[in-house]
Image (cartoon, rainbow, N blue to C red):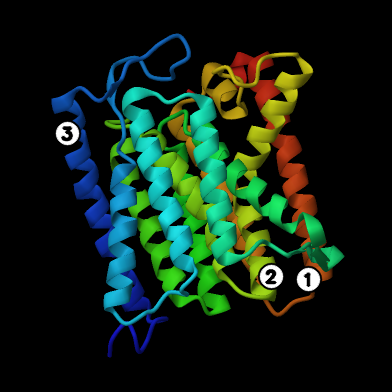
Amino acid sequence: MTIVETPTSVALWGAWAGMAFLASVAATYGAILFARTFGVLDVPNDRSSHVRPTPRGGGISIVLVGIAAVFAAIAFGYVPRTHASWAAIGAVIVAAVSSLDDVVTLSAKVRLAAHVSVAMLAVAGLGPIESIDAGPLGIVPLGVVAWPFTVVWIVGMTNAFNFMDGIDGIAGITGVAALGVIAAALLISGEQFCALVAAALAAASAGFLVWNWQPARIFMGDVGSAFLGYVIAVLPLTAAGEARAWSFSVTACVMWPFLFDTSFTMIRRIAKRENIFEAHRSHLYQRLVIAGWPHCVVTLLYGALSAAAGGAALAVYCGPGEKTVSGAYLACAIAIAAVGLVMLVRCVEAKPACAVS
């Protein structure tokens, strides 16, 4: 009995994830030693959430595990769709550019140009998101806006994940939740190769989290956050036909805390006529930390919101029930949770007694 013959075997999937987890734990420890030796440190400033110089660039461990997972899956007999290689090349480019940014700090224009280029590369290879499974509204075709919509989706997710990586553990725990849900969605849709890669990346994110939990011994850096954002955005595109439509919807649901926090903060800053390209500490998760909540509590909150929405989305889109009604309930639940998150932040800011010690 091999992983090729029984890809859904719980034991074999557990072993696959376990190896990825242990490899990430070891690789992240190696990254810590490397960063300390060569001075690759994040020195705190007035916008930082940490108080002492901390190694950065630990996300390289996730990248390396992802690359190893691709070759291991091929060795086990899985053959990726030919055009998926373009997306993989894009992921490597994102990691390389982001790794360079961790060391020398590239301009925002250079990073954006790189992100747009790899997004177009992925869409050229995999094709755009041509329709969205909107649950109660049914399948919504995108028509002529499919290409620009998909490019914006990939670029937006790549940057949103990077923006949200501002406190200990939040990027890692969201990576575990999102990639775990995406792996399940791809497995259901029949994309076993990409499901294996997604599962390995979820386990690698958990392995990194061992060293990134509060107090963090190392930060993910752009090399990890931008890479994860890109991969999470692109993986649904590896599904075909109707499966692509609902895989995208499931991904959007599991990532709603990051997408909502980023969008809400940007709109709020624009309304206040602030320069949205300047660094800041205005994200909802940052405001909770500033108000007194520990990193670990905020991280668990965001992780729980992602996991709950992702699990519910899988049940809605892959379950036997009626999607029209259950999809409407899910959309309402996410909307209520988003409003509740904003109200929670304002309550904590107004009443320090609400802060969790």
At 75% from the left edge and 77% from the top edge, which residue is drawn? 321
At 40% from the left edge and 69% from the top edge, which residue is drawn? 196
In the structure shown, which secondary structural element does the residue marked by tag 3 occupy? helix
Disc 1 to disc 2, how far (Cα)?
Answer: 7 Å
Q: Residues within 10 Å of mark 1 (few under 14, many from 20)?
A: many
- How far from the left and from the top, in percent, is residue 63? 33, 50
- How far from the left and from the top, in percent, is residue 12? 31, 77
Mark 1 / mark 2, whichever is N-terminal: 2
Q: Is residue 276 above or below residue 188?
A: above
Q: Are marks 1 and 2 in contact (CB under 8 Å)?
A: yes
Visible residue check, residue 96: yes
- Name the quadrant containing residue 309: bottom right
In the structure shown, which secondary structural element does the residue marked by tag 1 occupy? helix
Tag 3: amino acid: Phe
Task: Locate the N terminus and report the quarter of the image it occupies.
Answer: bottom left
* Nearest-to-viewer mark from 2 and 3: 3
Q: Which residue is mark 2?
A: 317
* Nearer to us in this view, 169 or 102: 102
* Nearer to us in this view, 43 or 222: 222
Mark 2 / mark 3, whichever is N-terminal: 3
Disc 1 to disc 3, how far (Cα)?
Answer: 50 Å
Q: Residue 34 bears which disc, if any?
A: 3
At 61% from the left edge and 42% from the top edge, which residue is drawn? 156
341 displayed left or right of 311: right
Q: Is residue 281 above or below residue 202?
A: above
- How far from the left and from the top, in percent, is residue 307? 55, 53
* Nearest-to-viewer mark from 1 and 3: 3
Q: Which residue is mark 1?
A: 323
